[in-house]
Each structure stands twice: as C-alpha cells, then as structure tokens.
Image (cartoon, helix red, strand yellow):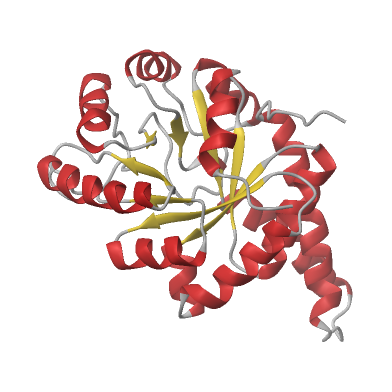
Amino acid sequence: MPLTPTGAIIREAASAAQGVGAFNVIQLEHAEAIVTGAETAGCPVVLQLSENAVRYHGALAPIGAAVLAVARAAGVPVAVHLDHATTSALVEEAVELGFTSVMFDASVLEYEENVRATAAVVAHCHTAGVWVEAELGEVGGKDGVHAPGARTDPAEAAAFVAATGIDALAVAVGTSHAMTTRDAELDFDLIAELRAAVPVPLVLHGSSGVADEHLTLAVERGMTKINIATHLNQVFTAAVRQSLDGDRALVDTRRYLGPGRAATAAEVARLLGVLKSPVLAG
C-alpha cells in the first residue's frame, strides 16, 4: 500500500470528530508494533520520528528509510511524520526522503520570529505536497508550548494559523511531555474554544500523561491528532524487563525485544479504540 498523506487521514478524522493516533518510533520494533496494532484495530495511523530520535541514530536517512518501508508494507493507511524538528535543514531532508508531514517547532522564538520561520517552512513543504504542523510557545517563548501551566490563546492561535498557512496546530491545554503518570488535567473548555476559533485540526502533544477517559473526551471536544510516545515506551520496556528478569541467561535480543514489540502492538490497538479512530470498512 502506498503512503497515505497525513492531511488526508487527519482532515477526515477531524470532520467526523474522531482521533488519530500519532505514535513515536525509536527503534524499528516500534514501527512494526505500531503498524501491527493499527492493522489489528483496522485504523489508520501516523508513525512519527522526532528530532531526538534522529539524534539518537546519528542521522535521519537510515531510520527514516526503515520507517517508510514499514509504512509502505502496511495493510492500513499509514502516514510518516517528522516530529519536533527545530531546523529547516532537517525538514528539507524529511521532505526529500518522502515523509508525508512535518512538525516544525519554533515555539522557543518570539511570536513574530516564530511566524516568519514557520511560514518559510510551510512554503517549502507545500511546494512538495507535504502537510505542516506547528505550535505556539508561551508569551516570550521561554519553555515552549508545553511548559507547566502554559495555555494557548484562541485568538492568537487563529492569527498564527492565518499568518503562517500551517495545516494543523499543536496547542497547550494542560499536557506536558515525557509524563510517566497519567494524571494530567486537561482544560476541556479551552479545547472547545480552540476548536471553534482555529480553522485547522488541533494536535495534542504530551498525551502519554492523559487518562483514557480524558483522551476520549479531548477528541470529543475537538482534538484530532493525538501524539503518544512515553506511554508506549513504558509498555515496551515493561515487557522487555519481564523477559530479562524471567531468564537471567537470556542474550538473544529477539527473545526480549519480541515481547516488547507484541505488548506495544496490543496497546496501540487498544488506544486507537480509546481515541475513537476511524475504522476502515471491510
């Protein structure tokens, strides 16, 4: 199956008040698990590679090519997304490799600088038919959009979308990255206000810290693309740890990474139900 444009998946879900799971890849096993889970659930999915994951591998091309290959072999629609890129050079490389979308993160910049940098990325990506997500930082931009207590102003968000031409907006509504507990307090009224004010789909970052019932409610109130990374890493690691603890002589990586992959696939399938993801006909 050819890659599916990210925009096609997200726009269709947004129009039906459904959520799309966007799950981060670190190793090849993550990509395989995410696609297997999506196939089990019969739902489209977004595979994400973050700038941090690229830094871990030392380059985008090898892991990017692997993720693209997994996506193309999938039995459900799969998009491939570059997450939290902070340089235009990395964005341009992802576009050249064939990624279907990018998230350009200039949220640490002052507002006007963020607008200029993001608009330039949008112009380049749209020429190649690539969908662009971006985010707003706090006033002053010190700690980015997901600093504790940060909230996105609906009027400023609408103005930012108009000024940059982005296709989706990551908003601050109470989540924070890298949470290992699922007790984030979302501002559901603000989500609804943002949905009414912003003409493009909304993206929830830091979703690992959100309880199942609140993920569902966030989708119902207007969030569409739901980014999850740390939670799946916890699931993967717990299965690997159980395998290693159960056999102290175990050295074959397939015998402990395999259970991690299987556990992650099952959790992806479950989460897609929580997110009310569109189920493919047939």
Q: Residue at x 41, y 18 (%)?
A: 195
Q: Residue at x 60, y 18 (%)?
A: 16
Q: Nearer the viewer, residue 36 or 108?
A: 36
What is the x, y in percent for residue 276?
68, 25
What is the x, y in percent for residue 139?
15, 36
Q: Nearer the viewer, residue 59 or 241?
A: 59
The answer to whether residue 99 is left or right of residue 76 is left
What is the x, y in percent for residue 238?
73, 60
Q: Nearer the viewer, residue 221 or 79?
A: 79
The answer to whether residue 135 is left or right of residue 212 is left
- What is the quadrant of the C terminus in the image? top right
Q: Residue at x 36, y 64 (%)?
A: 92
What is the x, y in percent for residue 182?
57, 38
Rendered position, 276 above or below 107: above
Q: How many marks?
A: 0
Q: Residue at x 76, y 45 (%)?
A: 76
